[in-house]
Image: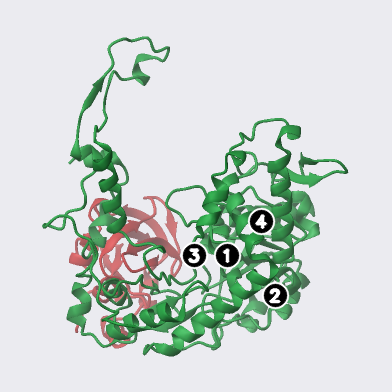
Amino acid sequence: MSFETPDDRRYLESHEWALETDGVVRVGISDFAQDELGDVVFVELPDEGDDVTQEAAFGVVESIKAVSDLYAPVSGEVVAINDDLFDAPERVNDDPFGDGWMLEIDPDDESELEDLLTADEYEDQIA
Amino acid sequence: MTGDRTRYDQARWTDDGQYEPLLSEKDRTRVEIDEDDSPLPDDLTRDSLELPELSEPELARHYTRLSQMTYGIDSGPYPLGSCTMKYNPKFTEDVAALPSGAVHPDRTERSLQGTLELCYRLQDYLGRIGGMDAVTLQPPAGAAGEFTGIRVAAAYHEHNGEDHRNEVIVPESAHGTNFATAALAGYDVISLPSDEGGRVDLEALEAALSENTAALMLTNPNTLGLFERDIVEIAEMVHDVGGLLYYDGANLNALLGRARPGDMGFDVMHYNVHKTFATPHGGGGPGAGPVGVVDDLAPFLPAPRVRKTATEYELFEPEHTIGHVHGFQGNWLVLVKTFAYIARLGDEGLTDASAKAVLNANYLASQIEYDVPYEPFHHEFVASAGDQDAADVAKRMLDYGVHPPTTKWPEIVPEALMTEPTEVESKETLDQLAAAFNAVAGEDDETLETAPERSSARRIDQTSAARNPRLSWQALEEE
């Protein structure tokens, strides 16, 4: 089974993706991650204005199979969260790289993105 | 043995697979009350109420059908790992139903001497079984016992001027309640990896221990059924940094009469009376999770405890008590059942129970085709469903008239089937269980994914249930 890994963004070994647009980094989990988790039933996110730290847990995703921590790709301030997920967690399964996004971070240091895996490197990891 | 022992069909009372209707769906008679003589404010009262009016046979059939559509330890084997689903002997129900036990606890101590004597003797029994110096019977469930035990440990550290200790270490294979207990008590939880053999990794433990360690929580045998052979060394390591060793009593059934947590160096433990001592599990009813401690921690136990004077039994408040964790003596009638079970089995019976629990687990494991990667195990084993999905295996086992094992946990075993037959099953029943495991082991994914097909309820939509939980009768009213 092959999974989508769009090359417009970077990835963490823990299966989150990070997409930078106009200085804001949007975060979600990969197609591979949503498939491994199975049906997502609950997403716990920080509040807008909270600070997150690169590689530290910022939230929790719960599926019928497992509960997993979510890790931040960069350090910074949370400027938006996808609160649609509270009522419609299935969006994480249906559209992990689009409507299933989780939060947006105003990064302290954009160059932290360079620490992350490229799409090719991430594909190798999940192959 | 005759006939196909794997053939099973559960009762279904309607063609369309709907559940037995609720009483309120069978009859919606409305009872009206005319006079308004209630002293309560209007917004707290109502003048009409839907109360089903059914004949006695209608009611008897309703509950009989429900009992036929469910599955319990009275229906067949129930090898749910780490849950110790023992048969609940009926005589303990008889004892708990004795009118002499129905004493309201809010009376003078002089008029409660029977209640207090039973509590005192049960404290003593549990203390001796666990190797603990003092016991509280108050916590109303296993998880409440865990929380109480960790709170007692925290109070001990605080009393000694060591409230900087902010970490509790929990093995990654531990019961989920251990992490939850430590977190709820305000501690940072340090997760400890297992070694290759599935036991506590001593090097990882050494690295995790520090002056900030409040406690290490362990169950022994652990959740793989393996005895922590290094327990004495582990206890020394924890004590050397000033930490306490907490025993999760969930797996005590493996050790009854043979080894005691107190002798291994544990300082505080809880007892799951619904597991080890055969009181009923869950069902929303009252439970009990007594806590035992060594002498140093006794002054911090919840109040009140029971002690014996020269002439009578009396309640007292431990010197530095953490306070009350439940009303009065805890859930009294569960404690009566616990007492009755221990008294009926005695030293010999309890020791025999642990022996047979271990024997049964080992016999069953030897009869099934699934791989059991970690051994030697005691009262439970964790098989791997291999290429099959453990949850699907569990659903399919229902079709063979047995309750499935715990699945997908501990995660150290891929597609885990955590199995604990307990001491109560005969060889014939264990063979029936093995036949169910082995029948499922040979089946294809399509069969597994559509199971169960012979049970009253077919595959439940777990995703919808989790996304849209209906947690009260009001959810039905809204439909």
Q: Read off the residue under disc 1.
A: B276
Label 4 – label 1 distance at C-alpha: 14 Å
Label 3 – label 2 distance at C-alpha: 24 Å
Labels in figure, total: 4
Residue A99 in the figure: left or right of residue B208: left
- At label 1, which amino acid type do we have? Thr
Q: Nearer the viewer, mark 3 or mark 2?
A: 2
* Residue B166 seen from this side: no
Expressed as whole percent of the image width and height from the top left, the position of residue B249 reads 60, 65
Do the dots labelled 3 and 2 sit on one chain?
yes
| Rendered shade, chain A | red
Q: Chain of mark 2?
A: B
Q: On residue B176, which mark appears?
A: 3
Expressed as whole percent of the image width and height from the top left, the position of residue B20 reads 21, 50
- CB within 8 Å, label 4 to label 2: no
Q: Residue furthest right?
A: B310
Which element is circle 2 on? loop
Mark nearer the N terminus (4 vs 1): 1
- At label 4, which amino acid type do we have? Val
| Rendered shade, chain B | green
Label 4 – label 3 distance at C-alpha: 19 Å
Q: Read off the residue under disc 2.
A: B259
Q: Chain of mark 1?
A: B
Residue B32 in the figure: left or right of residue B82: left
Mark nearer the N terminus (1 vs 2): 2
Which element is circle 1 on? helix
Q: Nearer the viewer, mark 1 or mark 3?
A: 1
B448 or B33: nearer the eye? B33
Label 1 – label 3 distance at C-alpha: 19 Å
Q: On residue B291, which mark appears?
A: 4
Mark 3 surroundings: few (<14), some (14-19) or many (≥20) residues within 10 A: few
